[in-house]
Amino acid sequence: MKPQVIVAPDFRTMDEIFDRQTREVLDQRFDVVWGQDGPMPHAAFEEAIQSCFAVVFGTWHYGTTALAGAGPDLRCILEVAGGHSHPDLDYATCFERDIAVGSCAHAFGPAVAEMALALTLAAKRLVPEGDIAFRRGEELWLHEGTVGATTLFGSTIGFIGAGGLAASLHPLLAPFGVEVLGFDPFIDDDALRARSIEPVGLDRLFDDSDVVYVLAAPAPANLHLVSRDLMERLEPDDLLVVISRAHLVDFEAMTDLVLQGRFRAAIDVFPTEPFDQHHRIRTAPNAVFSAHRAGAIPAALREIGRMVVDDLIAFAEGGTGTRMQYATPEMIEAVRS
């Protein structure tokens, strides 16, 4: 008898995360309950969770008490949204019952890192300005067109957050011969040094870095961690890349300073999305923008499905999942406090 798995990926769709081959393996190895787009009805979920082996979900639609009816066979709950930030999911009960809670966040790391590098090069080499000027027939050729451009080679890089995104981005920066500084209170200094990241405080990171990457996951404790005072330490040729969440940045202070020409910015995430059509940051000539497009490319979304199926098989065979990012009490405490 095949293990029973609730697959309810809403807000995502089945075809978005499962390619044909992965879906075939899922159906061959497991008895899939629901397996459709849209929210799974509460009554159907409450019945299925009594005997299911695993739950795969995108949005937790089932309330804080949903796990009270879970049967003894429930081994894992795997989310396909991108982080351990589901307020109605009872993580405490999961930890008490040894139910693994996996996140697909790692699926987005390579794609987000690639976009971070693309935005960096675009901003430093004035690619958007050159493109706009050329389309208008106002391009400046050769040396005249490179005034204000800078190079990434030999730069000092600052990572705010040195977790999964940093791990994906660091190898992409290595060919440029960069020195990397890092601030991450959740990672031991020796562990950072082992990854060729020099642990530093935020003041030094902003003083010494040519490019600062905002890579940390959002948590109540890091709201506006990137403050006006820190950003005022940047120089006009420096670049701030906001690629994880705008939650970490004092966005209005950043807007003031970018409009003043105090530094350049490359921004993929915003305080509200869709973003205010009339916000003044849109007029900044020394900024590059992307509409939260870094992670959710088709290749990354299909990787979510492969991660889910690989880890479901591992749990079904008596092991543990290794492809997804698994929550710990300390991790959830950091996200929520």
Image (cartoon, rainbow, N blue to C red):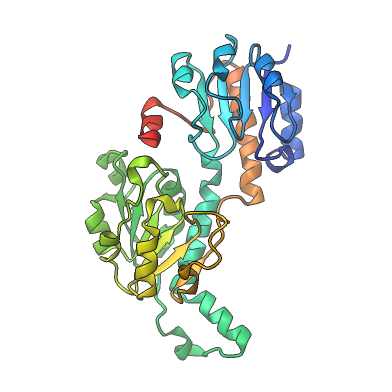
User: In which quadrant of the rendered image does the N terminus lie?
Assistant: top right
Q: Position of residue 314 (x, y in %)?
A: 59, 23
x 37%, y 46%: residue = 162
**Could you say which is closer to the camera, residue 73 or residue 285?**
285
The answer, for residue 322, to whether it is visible in the render is no
x 28%, y 46%: residue = 193
Residue at the outermost top position: 72
The answer, for residue 227, to whether it is visible in the render is yes
**Could you say which is closer to the camera, residue 332 or residue 208?**
332
Q: Is residue 118 above or below residue 53?
A: below
Horizontal placement of 335 versus 183: left or right? Answer: right
User: In which quadrant of the rendered image does the C terminus lie?
Assistant: top left
Q: Quadrant of residue 70?
A: top right
Q: Is residue 232 above or below residue 90?
A: below
Q: Position of residue 251 (x, y in %)?
A: 40, 59
Q: Position of residue 30 (x, y in %)?
A: 71, 21
How many marks do you count on the picture? 0
x 75%, y 26%: residue = 27
Horizontal placement of 301 versus 124: left or right? Answer: right
x 25%, y 63%: residue = 208
Q: Position of residue 230 (x, y in %)?
A: 27, 60
**Could you say which is closer to the camera, residue 22 or residue 60?**
60
